[in-house]
């Protein structure tokens, strides 16, 4: 699976491992929080294949997961 990180999260989650394998978003969050404890206190959104998710979502090896800080439109 491909995990992309944007904005201020790049300062926290770096370097991002290339070999992340998780069954769902909850497991991914747990893995990232264990490796990068500062992410626990950061607000961010998760998108799977371009769609924002708020609940635990199943992940496939071909999925693209994006971690994004809050943003505003204009």
Image (tube, rainbow, N blue to C red):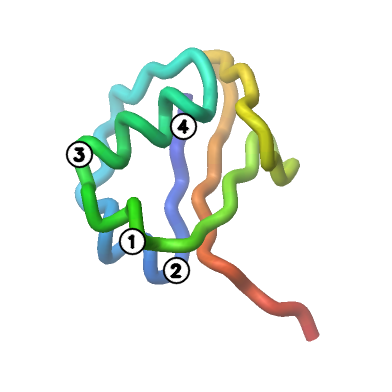
Q: Which mark is residue 2?
A: 4
Mark 2 and mark 3: span between their CA atoms?
A: 19 Å
Please tell me which residue lies in front, 13 or 1. 13
- Where residue 52 sits: x, y (%)? 71, 45
Q: Residues within 10 Å of mark 3 (few under 14, many from 20)?
A: few
Mark 4 and mark 2: span between their CA atoms?
A: 17 Å
Q: Which mark is residue 35?
A: 3
Q: Quadrant of the C terminus?
A: bottom right
Q: Of circles 3 and 4, which is in front?
A: 3
Residue that appears at 29% across and 23% down:
19
Mark 3 and mark 1: span between their CA atoms?
A: 14 Å
Q: Of circles 2 and 3, which is in front?
A: 3
Residue that appears at 32% across and 54% down:
39
Mark 1 and mark 4: span between their CA atoms?
A: 15 Å
Q: Are marks 2 and 1 in contact (CB under 8 Å)?
A: yes
Does dot 2 land on a helix, a strand or a loop? Answer: loop
Residue 50 sits above or below residue 73 on the image: above
Residue 41 sits above or below residue 54 on the image: below
Mark 3 and mark 4: span between their CA atoms?
A: 17 Å
Mark 2 and mark 1: span between their CA atoms?
A: 6 Å
Q: Which mark is residue 10?
A: 1
Q: Which mark is residue 7?
A: 2
Q: Of circles 1 and 4, which is in front?
A: 1
Q: Are marks 3 and 4 in contact (CB under 8 Å)?
A: no
Q: Residues within 10 Å of mark 2 (few under 14, many from 20)?
A: few
Q: Residues within 10 Å of mark 4 (few under 14, many from 20)?
A: some
Sequence-first tag of 2 and 3: 2
Sequence-first tag of 1 and 4: 4
Q: Residues within 10 Å of mark 1 (few under 14, many from 20)?
A: some
Sequence-first tag of 3 and 4: 4
- Where residue 68 sits: x, y (%)? 53, 58
């Amino acid at each position: 699976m491909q995990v992309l990180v944007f904005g201020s999260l790049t300062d926290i989650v770096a370097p991002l491992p290339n070999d992340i394998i998780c069954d769902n978003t909850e497991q991914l969050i747990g893995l990232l929080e264990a490796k990068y404890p500062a992410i626990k206190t950061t607000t961010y959104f998760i998108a799977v294949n371009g769609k924002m998710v708020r609940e635990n979502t199943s992940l496939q090896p071909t999925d693209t997961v994006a971690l994004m800080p809050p943003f505003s439109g204009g």
